[in-house]
Image: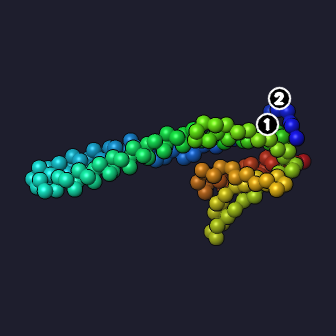
Amino acid sequence: MAMQTTTTTPLFSAALRPDRSLRAAGGWVALGVAAALVAPIIVAVPEFAVPVLAGFALTATGLVILGVRQSRNQRITQQITLWPEQLEIATTDAKGERMLRRFDPKAVRLVLDRDLNEKTRALRLRSGTEDIEIGAFLNADDKASFAKEFGRALRQARQ
């Protein structure tokens, strides 16, 4: 069913992005400090040079892989906008490709998957037989906070 975007103010709008707390720069600083601390030992005992340098090479390779992965994850977003007559989810993946989906708020249900400790593991929208996970990249606390606010707005849209 084709729906038109409205010009009214949305009931709810959120831009979801992955947590960017892991920074490759911190790893490079730690690698530099470790190299400075190990350098005198390598000079004093040259037999340790090959295994230590191999370890540093593996660590540097891991940091490069982490940096590439982090730069790709920076593109991931989900823009969720809810109006009284329409729910719109715009998802941008790691490749930069964008997908837009629209739903009737009265026909969609928010489903929370929780673990044994009642932490929110997943947020899904169910519309008929279709299930869509939203905010898969969020941590458990952010998922719970988002679910509370989004659930309130979704109930308001159904009235």
Residue at 67% across, 37% down: 98
Residue type at mark 2?
Thr
Local crowd size for mark 1, using a 10 Å CA cut-off: few (<14), some (14–19), many (≥20): some
Nearer to me, 71 or 117: 71
Residue at 79% across, 53% down: 130
Residues at marks 2 and 1 touching, judged by CB atoms closer than 8 Å: no
Nearer to me, 142 or 42: 42
Left/right placement of residue 56 relative to residue 120 reads left
| SS at circle 1 | loop
Quadrant location of the N terminus? top right
Residue 159 placement (x, y as % from top left) = 90, 48
Task: Report how far apart the C-alphas of labels 2 and 1 lie in the structure.
Answer: 9 Å
Q: Return the residue at label 2.
A: 7
Seen as rendered, the residue at the extreme right is: 159
Residue at 65% across, 49% down: 135
Quadrant of res 96: top right
Task: From this view, report whether residue 117 is shown above or below residue 101.
Answer: below
